[in-house]
Structure formats: C-alpha cells, structure tokens
Image (tube, helix red, strand yellow):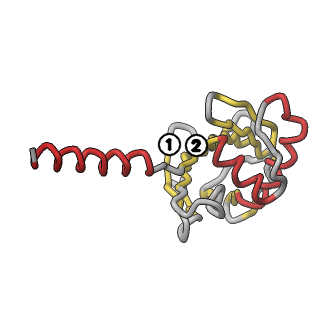
Amino acid sequence: MKRLSALLVLLVLCSSFITAHKFYVSVTQIEYVASKQHVQIISRVFIDDLEDVLQARYDESLIITEKEAATITPVVSKYFKKKLSIQIDNQIADYKFLGFEIDNDLMLCYLEINNVKDFNTITVDNQLLMDQFVEQQNIVHVKKEEVRKSVVLEDGNHKGMLNFSN
C-alpha cells in the first residue's frame, strides 16, 4: 500500500511539472533570393504569446484574428520594428512588413528587404517576446543559395551574426 501511495504521489508531481512547463519559442526563416535581389523573411510566433505582449504594450482589448488584420497589422509591424533588427554586411536593413496569416495557433509574419545585391554577413537581433517571457528562445535560420546556417537567440544573447563569405 505504501508503494502504491508513493507511486501515486510521484505521478501527480510529475504531471504537475509537465502541465506547468510551457515552451516559449519563435522561428524566423530568412532566405536570400539572388534573382530578385531581395531577402524574404517569415517569422512564426505563437498567437497567444504575441497577443499577451501586444495587450500589455498597446491595447488590452487586442485580439489576433485574420478578420481584424486591418487593425492588427500596424500594431504587429510596430512591435516587430522595435524588437527585430537585421543588418546586412554591418548596415541596418530596412525591412517592410508585408502582412500575416494564421495557421492554427501560429501567426506567420511576412517581411521583405529589397535591393540586396549580395552579402557576406547577416546579423539578426531578435528580441521578439523576450520582454514578456524570460524563457523565450528565438531560432533564426538563414539560407543563401544552398548554404543554410542557424542560431538560437535568448535573453542576454539576442543578437547573432552568420557569416557566408567563402
């Protein structure tokens, strides 16, 4: 009986750790398209996490839905401009926020940098959601031609440089 009780207590404790733990992660894909001389960016963030941040910073009543795209897009764009910075060969790149779509519990945000002839290095400073969640990790994948490099950014280490020179 003691073993059964101990096993039940252990199961309850383990299940509480599992349900209490939540992962805070975003994934940003950056791809250089040489034929068009631009950089395409797709950033995937969990809707509920982004909604929490935007409500805390801008408007408590804000709800993220595709139907509300006209009112949400400027707010999301403003937040991205403050929290996501990209440098190409040590020059700050001015990206355009093209819009977003919702895929289940993810928001896919589309951005673009025009007039990029070529580059050797790309530096990404990604602090998305870090002001709300200290456990936040932002994974960045960069693809140039057939070469793909990645970096994981987190609080205290939110900036990474990827080198594509030969």
Question: Quick one: SS at disc 1?
Answer: strand
Q: Position of residue 22 (x, y in %)?
A: 48, 49
Mark 2 vs mark 1, CA separation in Å: 5 Å
Q: Can residue 80 be seen in this view?
A: no
For the point 65% across and 43% down, the residue is 48
For the point 64% across and 61% down, the residue is 132
Above or below, 22 relative to 127 = above
Q: Name the residue under label 2.
A: 144
Task: Please report contact status of discs 2 and 1: CB closer than 8 Å, yes or no.
Answer: yes
In the shown orientation, is residue 128 left or right of residue 21?
Answer: right
Judge by depth and name the residue closer to the eye, 55 or 134: 55
Question: Quick one: SS at disc 2?
Answer: strand
Q: Which residue lies furthest to the front in this view?
A: 1
Mark carried by residue 1: none
Number of numbered discs overlaid on the protein picture: 2
Q: Place residue 30 in its image quadrant.
A: top right
For the point 84% across and 42% down, the residue is 72
Q: Which amino acid does label 2 sit on?
A: Lys
Judge by depth and name the residue closer to the eye, 70 or 59: 59
